[in-house]
Every structure is written in structure tokens, then in C-alpha cells.
Amino acid sequence: MDDLACDQAYGLRRLLGRPRCRVLTFLSAGDQEARDSVLINLGASLARSGKDVVLVNACRTPGAIAARLGASAGQTLLNVARNECDLGDAIHRTIQGFGYVDMSRVRRLGAEDVGRLEHAFAILTGSCDVVLVSTELNAHHQLPIDAFAAGDLVVQLSTSRKSIAAAYGLIKAMSSISGRRPFGVLLTGASEVEADMVYRNMAQAARRYLAIKLECLGSVPADDCVARASGMGRTVVDAFPLAKASAAFRRLAEAVVHPSTV
């Protein structure tokens, strides 16, 4: 009994002493390659700052992100949810310094598996500092699991009219299901001036027509160093630390760690 009480006290101290994991769920308004680049470089920037980071790929089609990270088709979070493997077996530790896990390779999940995934995701968020989720909406404008909406919802977009319209459509669709809540926006391929102009116009429209508050997470400028680093199998913050994009990702990582500074 004394040993049990001691174990419970130790567990409680660990629970109370560990900061709450921050979850950021990213949706792309058109350019999925740009979103993947953001997630990889942001994950690396957070890892370099000492954070334990896991990137969850919850898109219906895996895309190129796993290949870019050198992650082979192993166990998924669904395997963890079904008690077919441990969480550590499903997380691929990348050379970029963070963990990567696919949510599932099953295109259509039953209600039982969705419930199990909710539980597995809760276990994941209890084991690290930051979880970055790459996902998309289904035909009913819903996220794969409700837990993805419990954190910060971030829409990545560019300054093109098509991307801006798609981003506004995503926000409108999600708000019709989840109700009024703030959304983050992240501009890629844009200067600070361009990003600020797009953000202000979108924020005004969202506030006026949807009664929704938008928050600008930041912007990443167009920078050839990002593609050059990717071609070398590295992140821009590692290969070209003095590049403009690297500075932007460091600022973005700081904003994630300290939200009040956004």
C-alpha cells in the first residue's frame, strides 16, 4: 500500500509539473507542399529550442511529407489505438530532431476506431510539449477527430486570390460546424507588408460576416534557401540559419512557445 501511495504521489507530481502540451492543427488553403515545408521547418525550430515535438500526419493521402522525413510505412497511431503496438513504436524519430507519426492508413474509419484514436491522441499529447497536426476536412466539413479542434486551428495560405478565397472558405466551413471560435492564419511566400495586408482584410471580413476573430500567427517569406535545403534533405534553419526564412521560422517557434507574444 505504501508503494502504491508513493507511485501515485510521484505520478501526480509529474502531472502537475509538466506544462500542458500545445496542439496546433494546420489546414492548407491550396498549397500542401508549402504547408509540409512549414510543419517540417517549424518542428525543427521548436526541437532546436529544446521542445519535445511530434508531427502527426492526419491527411487522407500521405503525400510527400513522410518521404521528405525519411519515415517508412511503419506503425500508425491507429495501431496504438487498437493496442497493436506501443506509442513509441509508432513514432519515427527524424534527423530533423522531432517525432513523426501517421494517424492512419485507413481512408474510412468506423466510430469505434475514431473513439480509440481520440484516446490515443490524448496519450500522445500527454507525452510531449508540442503536437503539430497536418490534416484536412472531410466531405462534412469536419476534422478526422474532435481532439484536433481542442487546440489551435491554423489555416496556411498564400497571397494569391485563389488561396485567400480557399482559406476564407475553410474558416467559414469549420465555423458552421464547430461554432464561433478564433482561427490562426499563417501566410507563406509573403513579405511582412503583404502578409499584414492580407491578414487585416481577412480579419475584417471574418469579424463582419462570420463574427469570428482571426489571429495572425506570422508569415514566412519566399526564400530559395527553403527549396535548396529540402533538396539536401535538411531544414532551412539547419542548412541556412541566416536565411530570411530561417529567421521567420525562429519567430514562429517563439510565438508557439509563448503565445502571448503573437
Image (spheres, grey):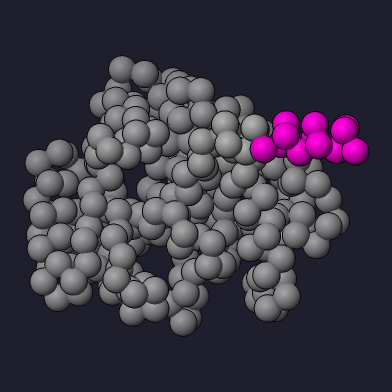
Quadrant for the N terminus in the image: top right
The secondary structure that dominates the magenta segment is helix
Q: Is residue 155 left or right of residue 47?
A: left
Q: Residue at the spot x=30%, y=30% of the render?
A: 251
Q: Residue at the spot x=46%, y=82% of the render?
A: 140
Q: Tell me where the magenta segment starts and ends, as one range.
A: 1-12
Image: 213 above or below 51: below
Quadrant for the C terminus in the image: top left
Is residue 5 inside the magenta stretch?
Answer: yes
> Can you tell which quarter of the image residue 191 is in?
top left
Q: Is residue 174 left or right of residue 59?
A: left
Q: Is residue 37 left or right of residue 8?
A: left
Q: Residue at the spot x=38%, y=57% of the render?
A: 153
Rendering coords of residue 46 (x, y %): 46, 30
Rendering coords of residue 68 (x, y %): 56, 40
Image: 6 above or below 142: above
Which of 102/2 is in front? 2
Q: Is residue 211 visible?
A: yes
> Can you tell which quarter of the image residue 91 is in?
top right
Is residue 89 inside the magenta stretch?
Answer: no
Which of 82/4 is in front? 4
Rendering coords of residue 209 (x, y %): 14, 75
Residue farthest to the right?
A: 1
Q: Residue at the spot x=28%, y=45% of the render?
A: 217
Rendering coords of residue 10 (x, y %): 73, 31
Q: Is residue 224 visible?
A: no
